[in-house]
Every structure is written in C-alpha cells, then in structure tokens.
Image (cartoon, rainbow, N blue to C red):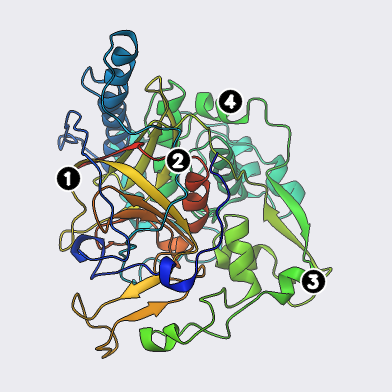
Amino acid sequence: MLALRKPYNKLSLSLGIGLACALAPVAYAQNNSTEIPIESYRLSQSASNQTTQQAEAAQQAVQVAQSPNSLQNRLNAAQSNPPALDVADATTDVAQAPVAATEDASSNADNTVASGTGYADPEVAALENSPENKAMPTDSASVEAAKNAKWTLDGINNTTWAQGIEKGRLPIFAKIQVLLNRKHASPGAIDGATGMNTLKAISTYQTMNNLNATGKMDQQTWDSLTAGQTKPVFVEYTITAADIKGPYASSIPSNYAQQAKMKGLYYTRVTEMLGERFHMDENFLQKLNPNATFKKAGEKIIVANVRNDLPEDIHLIIAHKGAKQLYLFNSKNKMIASFPATIGSSDTPSPEGTYTVKNVAPNPWYGYNPKNFVQGGNMKPLSLPPGPNNPVGNMWIGLSKPSFGIHGTPNPSLISKTASHGCIRLTNWDANDLAKRVEKGITVKFLE
C-alpha cells in the first residue's frame, strides 16, 4: 500500500507537459532510472480476426512474463543464487515529487455509444459474423428471456447468459461487464453493450483463469464468472447532499489559458461524477435512470456494484500497443488483472523497451509549454490546475522514461478507441486503482 502524502504546493506539483508524452523532454521533476531489459516479442499478424488477436495478445504477455529472461524470473533466481540483481527496492514508498505528465488534452470525437437495445460496436460486428464465430446450438427460450429482460434491478440481477444471445445492448451484457470488473478484467466504462473493450476483457479473463481464450462468452466462462458471486451486480444508490454540492465547474473551456485561470478542473455535472464513481458510461447511467433528475439529495438511482481494488502482488506491467491493453502480473508470473488502454499512435508512438515505475502523483498539475506545441494561440507556459477533467485526469504514475507515464483521462468512454500522444491512458478509476498498488521499481514493458 502507498503511504499517504502531504499535499504539494502548486509549484512543486506542476508537471511539465510537451506535445505529449513522447515529445516533452522537460519537466519540473525528472524521471531517472536504469532500464532493466527483458525479452521482446511481437504479436503474431497471422490471426484471422481481431478476437483471435486479442487472445494472442494476452497469451503473448504471459509468454513475456514467464520467459526465462523475464525480470521476475531473474529476480527469483537471484534470491536463491546471490548476489542479487541491482534492482530498485520494491518496498520503497512511491510518495515523491511528481514527474512530467505529458498528455495533450485534445478531444477525440470518437465512437460515443449509441442508445437503446441493438447497439453494436462497428468493429465487433464483423467478428461476430465471421465463420469461426457462428453460434452453437441454442436454447431459444433462454435466449428470448435474456433479450427481453428489463432494465430494472431485478431484470439485470436475475438475467442469465445463454448460448446464442445476439450482440447489442442488453441487461446480460451489463451484468457480464460488472462481473468482469470484479474479477479484475476491466471492460472500461460499463455501458451494457458488446464493444471491443468487453471482448478484450473476456479474453483476458479467460487467459487468467486457464479457460479457452477465444474472447467470446461460453458456458464455461459464464460459470466461472458467476462462481461465488452472491452480491447483486447492480444496486440502488441514494444521491447525497455532498454529491449535489460538488465542487463542480460550470464548464471546461477548451482553451488552456482559460483552464489555467480556474480553481480546479472539476466535474461539470453530477452524472459525470457518478458515472466515474461507479465505472459507468455517463449516457448509460442516464438512460438506466430515465426518471432521475440528478439534482436533488435523496433521489434513488440504479448503479453498477463494482470493485475498487486490485491484487497487491504486482511485479510486472505489460503495455500491449497492438491490443490496447495493460496487463498486470504477480511475482509468480501469473496474469492477475488487465485494463483497456490508449497507448500512443503512429504519429506519436509510445516508447519501446522496458522501464520502471518512478513515482505517483495524484491530482497532478498539467504544465503547458508552447515550445512543444501551441494550443489556442497561447505563447506562454501555463499551469493547468488538478481535477478529473485535467488533460491527464486525476492520477499520474511516472515512469523512468522522462516525460512518460500511466495516467487518467477526462474522457473515460473513449479509452482504447482513440490515439494518445505516447503515454498509457486509462480511465480515471483504473488509474487510481493501479496507483494504490504500484510500488517504485515495478517493471513496465512495452510490446508492439
């Protein structure tokens, strides 16, 4: 566990930003650490569809973690065959001065989720219609029952998966997303729909539990997901006076100079805040509660009953660029968690190779420098205040590669659907959960 930190003042918490993680060489606090190489692998390009590629990506990450030259295997060998490797003490507190947060805040108008039953992620449609994904014999009555389930507490909590359920937005998919979330295979923002992030989470969950990693739901995966689950996947929540009070910003201007004048880059509305608290897509939260105003204390709404923790034994993080996934491994080289992630782009790629966690900075300041790029005609350096709508969200995990890190986002529903400027972008809640468990010196490996 990380020790609690004393609040930093504005100057010490300001983070030097460049055109993105890849292009910002200067920061108020630099990351410096010796790189620890491990074997490099590439994702096979022979997969016939993206579902197979996602399964292969997870398997590739496992191969890297379990390879004879992997960091943890070398550490294990060192423990039994002194002298030990010269590796940073993993128990060292990460509470240090923050490092360069380096993600451009430019908005990416990408696939916002359509509403209503029948929505399907366009990139998934081809997968589910491919020959290898043709449905097995189905129980038509069970399929119809799942398709006709109501968007109520009982409807969502009591629905059951059946072979042959069509793609779309259905209560059963919302239930599956919460179950995946609880089992540390994050589907990103819960939206009740069959999107690529959900397929990736299914594939990762199957890999973690030694199931046939197809990325598709089957009876064995469903049985495993629901085993031992006694708590409802959705619950009733009563909006409090504190929820209404905030603080909230009336809006977040796009111009950095205007953002720099704000007291904080807060949430702008209750639904945005509650969506992040319960790991839900904001539009989905509103559609699930059509009669709610979200403007008064005492109002009852339906929300996802999610987890907010991760396993403690994290020894290796693999950022897979092709899969747009972050995989976590323990000291026994077992995959224990995963997140959808936005990892660089062709124009501003993420780094290659192996690095380590340098430090953690919750609620970071974002430092704008026009030497790296010009935003809104601003020709002077600016410091943008903390908040969940900060360009790097409300969490920064600095790496030993200067100006690169793992961080949050002001746009959680776009994670892994758009490009980043070199860093590893997660939802704010996934970044915060990870920050609670990482320690200084943990290895971060980038794979293509």
Which numbered disc, 3 or 2, marks the residue closer to the eye? 2
Give the Cα separation between the discs numbered 4 and 3. 40 Å
Q: Is residue 437 or residue 207 the one in the foreground? A: 437
Q: Quadrant of residue 253?
A: bottom left
Mark 1 → mark 4, Cα distance in angstroms: 39 Å
Residue kind at label 4, given as amino acid type = Asp
Q: Name the residue under label 3.
A: 241
Q: Mark 4 points at which residue?
A: 223
Q: Residue at 67% across / 49% down in the picture?
A: 149
What kind of element bears circle 4?
helix
Which label's residue is closer to the chain start, 4 or 2? 4
Task: Give how far across and how far down residue 300 sits, in percent.
Answer: 80, 63
Q: Reading the chain from its start, which is encountered first: label 4 or label 3?
A: 4
Q: Residue furthest top?
A: 80
Please identify the quarter of the rendering in which residue 61 is found.
top left
Q: Is mark 1 on a helix, strand or loop?
A: loop
Q: Name the residue under label 1.
A: 352
Kindly identify which residue carries mark 2.
438
Q: How many labels does the image show?
A: 4
Quadrant in which the N terminus is drawn: top right
